[in-house]
Amino acid sequence: MTSKALEICYDFPFFLQEELDEIFQAHEKVSFQKGDIILEEGKMANEYYILEKGLARSYVNDFSGNEVTTHFFADNEIIIEVLSLFQRIPSQENIVCITDCECWRFDFETFQELYHKIPNLSEWGRSWMSKELFVYKQRSVEMFTLSATKRYLNLLEQKPQVVQFAPLKQIASYLGVTDTSLSRIRKEIVSHPKKN
């Protein structure tokens, strides 16, 4: 079994081929349809997924009951709710498919077995976690240091499929702006592309 998504996600220089083979074989191919809930708030995460094709998002409900998008998951990324999965606590987030999604499922118990059996998997895990921590830290700083227009342009560059498939309301909540502001930003970019 070879998959470009698995190869990209587990691209780590110290893996031996037989280790990768064992890790890949531990994944199960699953499909979700647009609108399917992968993880619901209050439930425990018991697996993570490698997204081969599609777009998903995580969101929370704020104190007023509004959905606020916390993350978008695109091709070749890991769909995961880290706190729930590794701390074994109910999720505070919901994860839902924006489009039909093709994924590789890796259940927690099997992951734990291989994590202790294959030292390079634990090294990969540490490397992945530190990279993700950097990304989240950078995003939290950019929410205060970059203009909404610049944040939108960064999203457009990093994950163009989000702008292509996600509803305006979901993108606006992710960027921390209102729908109206985002509509205005998009119009300005179209009419004055050189200014941005």
Image (cartoon, rainbow, N blue to C red):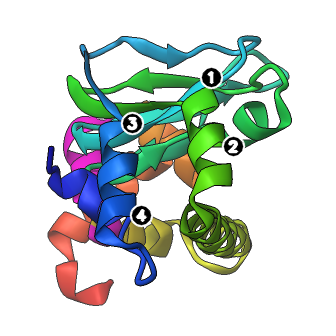
Does 160 lie within the magenta span? yes
Q: Residue at x 80, y 19 (%)?
A: 90
For label 3, the residue is 26
Measured from the top left, where is residue 122 in percent x and y? 64, 63
Nearer to us: label 1 or label 2: 1
Marks 2/3 in contact by CB < 8 Å: the verdict is no
**Nearer-the-camera pick, 125 or 52:** 125
Q: Is mark 3 on a helix, strand or loop?
A: loop
Question: Can residue 184 be seen by looking at this rendering?
Answer: yes
From the viewer's perspective, tell me whether residue 70 is left or right of residue 57.
right
Alpha carbon distance from label 3 to label 4:
37 Å
Q: How crowded is mark 3: few (under 14 residues within 10 Å), some or many (20 or more)?
A: some
- Could you tell whether 46 is left or right of 186 in the image? right
Residue bearing mark 2 = 82
Question: Of label 4 and label 2, which has the lower sequence position?
Answer: 2
What segment is highlighted magenta in the picture?
157-167
- Residue that badge 1 annotates: 46
C-alpha distance separating marks 1 and 2: 10 Å
